[in-house]
Image (cartoon, grey):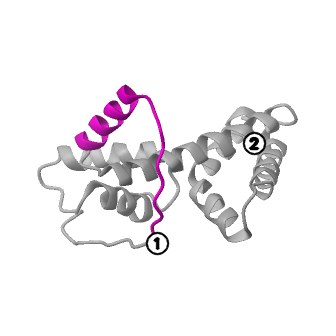
């Protein structure tokens, strides 16, 4: 099983969709470091329609990106998909978190954050189906940020 599929398996089954991508990479590291770990002996396939795109970036940035992707046995496509998901988390949830920080703490902060997040996603210039994709892809990080508001209130 390739590392991209392993990460998806970890996120879905081990972390039950409740952790950010960095936690999935930590679990992958633990798995790769354990000689007796048979978590990934079964093949899992994830199919989705693909669309081609191209981007222009600094040559050294692309070389670094490819080196990191290769280190974790990712194709450039798989690594780019993860980079996009990370961008969604950072931009959508980071922006909503900043908006909510200015208004409330504790339970009110959680509500302010979730409301701001919802408004940001609804403001995206795309159809409702694509907004749902963004909502789902950013859910794990959003729940972690929402818990931050509860920790502040304690």
Q: Is residue 69 magenta?
A: yes
Q: Quadrant of residue 46?
A: bottom left
> Where in the figure is residue 8, as x and y percent of width and height?
39, 60
- Residue found at the far left of this picture: 35
Total labels drawn: 2
- Horizontal placement of 4 versus 87: left or right? left
Nearest the eye: 38 or 79: 79
- Horizontal placement of 66 versus 131: left or right? left
Which quadrant holds the N terminus? bottom left
Q: Disc 2 designates what residue?
A: 96
Determine whether the residue tagged by mark 1 lies in a helix, strand or loop.
Answer: loop
Nearest the eye: 70 or 40: 70
Residue at the image point whose x is 18% and y is 56% from the top: 37
Crowding around mark 2 (Cα neighbors within 10 Å: few <14, some 14 to 19, many 20+) is: many
Q: Are marks 2 and 1 in contact (CB under 8 Å)?
A: no
Nearest the eye: 69 or 150: 69
Residue at the image point whose x is 28% and y is 54% from the top: 3
- Horizontal placement of 138 versus 49: left or right? right
Residue at the image point whose x is 33% and y is 56% from the top: 4
Q: Is residue 109 above or below residue 15?
A: above
> Where in the figure is residue 63, as x and y percent of width and height?
31, 32
* Label 2, label 1: how far apart the Cα atoms are: 30 Å
Q: Is residue 137 above or below residue 32?
A: below
Which quadrant holds the C terminus? top right
Q: Is residue 126 magenta?
A: no
Give the residues drawn in magenta, as a range: 50-71
Q: Which mark's residue is nearer the viewer, 2 or 1?
A: 1
Q: Disc 1 designates what residue?
A: 49
> Where in the figure is residue 10, as x and y percent of width and height?
37, 58
Residue at the image point whose x is 50% and y is 60% from the top: 17
């Amino acid at each position: 099983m390739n590392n991209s599929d392993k990460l998806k398996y970890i996120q879905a089954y081990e972390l039950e969709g409740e952790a950010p991508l960095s936690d999935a990479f930590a679990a992958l590291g633990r798995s790769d470091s354990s000689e007796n770990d048979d978590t990934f002996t079964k093949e899992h396939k994830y199919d989705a329609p693909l669309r081609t795109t191209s981007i222009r970036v600094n040559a050294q940035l692309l070389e670094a990106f490819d080196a990191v992707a290769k280190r974790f046995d990712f194709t450039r496509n798989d690594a780019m998909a993860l980079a996009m998901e990370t961008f969604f988390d950072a931009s959508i949830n980071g922006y909503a978190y900043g908006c909510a920080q200015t208004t409330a703490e504790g339970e009110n902060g959680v509500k302010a954050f979730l409301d701001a997040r919802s408004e940001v996603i609804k403001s995206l210039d795309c159809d409702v189906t694509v907004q749902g994709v963004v909502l789902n892809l950013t859910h794990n990080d959003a729940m972690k940020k929402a818990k931050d508001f509860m920790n502040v209130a304690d």
